[in-house]
Image (spheres, rainbow, N blue to C red):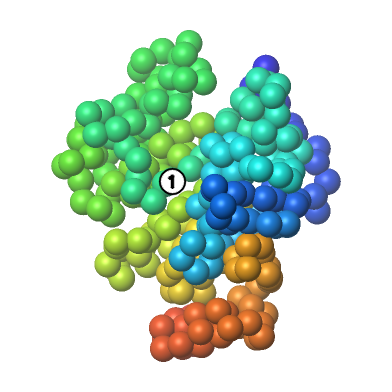
Amino acid sequence: MHDAATIEEACETAPADAPVIRVRGLRNQFGTQVVHEGLDLDVRRGEILGVVGGSGSGKSVLMRSIIGLRRPDAGNIEVLGVDAHSDDPEDRLHVERSTGVLFQDGALFSSLTVGENVQVPLKEHYPGLPDTLRYELALLKVKLAGLPADAIDKLPSQLSGGMRKRAGLARALALDPPLLFLDEPTAGLDPIGAAAFDRLTRTLQQALGLTVFLITHDLDTLYAVCDRVAVLAERKVVAVAPIEEIERLDHPWVQDYFHGPRGRAAREAVHRAGKET
């Protein structure tokens, strides 16, 4: 069985330039609708990769395929050198323990407190931990996600939307995974709350050495924290590069998305921030 030390060892012994996520020839189909066809993508160690695309381009389907929640119709996916859809229980456990996921709506259990939500993966993967230690670990993750300590004993219904996002983030970090998946983390947040979440994402990525797969439509997030951007269109990844290169891509969706009023405003905000610092 892959334990935490084994996962860490696998991360350290893999070549430094080896992608931590490698997708080749991915095909996802729902009935007659083909969402992905021949999709290739590499995610580099230690980067924040922003994933963008129009409605129906399959951003969340791609994420679910990578983390093993959906078996693709064709193609191969490797996560930290392991087949993400292996039939070997040890391989599946390796992927599960290596990935933390913040779903778009937080996906918290409404009948459990924040602390109990954070302890769910700890109970599943480390059932032998004493209750007191599990609680202390949950409290650590709650604080790490930027929540006050007293949030640990509150129900999700007692939290604001932004606090629920952070509670979901705390649960995603419960197992100290090297890979973090964020699905529209700033959706529904006001500009101040969204900017604060962006800063938290970058701080955690740098402090914990995370690799972050970040699905977003928020241009401010792309410019503020993403090292590279992957564009989903025409059923595949049409480009993956730093945002300055993506902006120059001669593609209709890219031009509309990055060079419209909101794109210009996001660029100007980044330039202003750069001058101030």
Instruction: Name the residue at the right extreme.
Output: 15
Q: Measured along the vertical axis of the image, is residue 173 above or below residue 161?
A: above
Residue drawn at (41%, 37%), measured in percent from left and top?
171
State how many labels appear: 1
Horizontal and vertical percent for residue 197? 38, 59
* Residue occupying image coordinates x 73% and y 57%: 38
Amino acid at dot 1: Leu
Q: Nearer the viewer, residue 87 or 171?
A: 87
Is there any visible trace of residue 213 in the rendered image?
A: no
Quadrant location of the N terminus?
Answer: top right
Is 200 situated left or right of 160 in this image? right
Q: Position of residue 104 (x, y in %)?
A: 39, 51
Q: In this figure, which residue is indicated by the disc labeled 1?
A: 102
Instruction: Determine the image quadrant of residue 83.
Output: top right
Residue 209 locus on image (x, y percent)? 61, 49
Residue drawn at x 61%, y 49% is 28
Residue 164 appears left or right of 258:
left
Query: For this rendering, which residue is in front, 172 or 86?
Result: 86
| Residue 92 visible, this angle | yes
The residue at the point 54 percent across, 37 percent down is 69
